Image: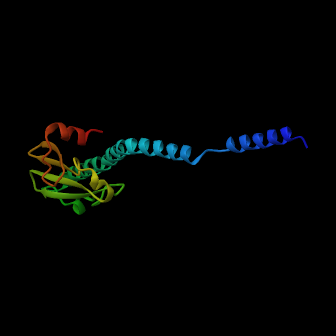
């Protein structure tokens, strides 16, 4: 066999092996780029998920408000959750609903985030209050719901 032909074949085999796949360095660079992109995108995604879950509390509070009004139409004062026929949790279970106070003049409802939704620091608690025919929406990181007006708008926006 011709030595030139043999060396030509071995070079072509090496070239074929070299072009056959990715090197470890190329793979690690790809994994690194994917990690950086996902670390940038995840907080934004999580924020949108928190906001979407917040509508669960809004639905529950507005349903409880309607139930309280129906209860008041047949009774001398507003009632408890059980009296008004309202579940103590939101429809999807991301919030716990409670009546803070209720009397003949009005009521106060509080939705408190539970489980994973409790990481929604700025809007962890949502409060709906009806006092002397004035409806008030409030939000906050604790049960005092002391967010400023612009934060309340952000928490209550649909």
**Residue 99 image-quadrant placement:** bottom left
**Residue 88 image-quadrant placement:** bottom left
Q: Would you say 34 lies left or right of 93 here? A: right
Name the residue: 73% across, 42% down.
Answer: 16
The x and y percentages for residue 33 are: 46, 42
Name the residue: 57% across, 48% down.
Answer: 24
**Quarter the C terminus occupies:** top left
In the image shown, does 7 or 115 lie closer to the viewer? 7
In the image shown, does 8 or 123 lie closer to the viewer? 8
In the image shown, does 76 or 19 lie closer to the viewer? 19
Name the residue: 32% across, 49% down.
Answer: 56
Q: Would you say 136 lies left or right of 60 here? A: left
Q: What colour scheme does the image use?
A: rainbow
Name the residue: 23% across, 60% down.
Answer: 81
Q: Would you say 84 lies left or right of 26 here? A: left
The x and y percentages for residue 17 are: 71, 45
Please, is residue 130 above or below residue 94 in the view? above
The x and y percentages for residue 149 are: 15, 38
The x and y percentages for residue 140 are: 17, 48
Q: Would you say 53 lies left or right of 81 here? A: right
């Amino acid at each position: 066999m011709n030595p030139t032909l043999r060396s030509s074949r071995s070079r072509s085999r090496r070239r074929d092996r070299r072009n056959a796949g990715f090197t470890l360095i190329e793979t690690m660079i790809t994994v690194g780029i994917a990690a950086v992109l996902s670390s940038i995108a995840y907080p934004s995604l999580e924020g949108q998920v928190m906001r979407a879950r917040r509508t669960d509390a809004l639905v529950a509070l507005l349903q409880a408000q309607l139930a309280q009004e129906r209860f008041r139409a047949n009774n001398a004062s507003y009632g408890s959750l059980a009296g008004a026929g309202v579940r103590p949790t939101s429809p999807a279970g991301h919030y716990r609903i409670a009546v803070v106070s209720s009397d003949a003049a009005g009521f106060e409802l509080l939705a408190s985030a539970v489980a994973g939704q409790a990481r929604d620091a700025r809007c962890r608690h949502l409060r709906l209050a009806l006092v002397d025919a004035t409806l008030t929406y409030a939000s906050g990181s604790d049960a005092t719901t002391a967010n400023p007006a612009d934060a309340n708008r952000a928490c209550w926006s649909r």
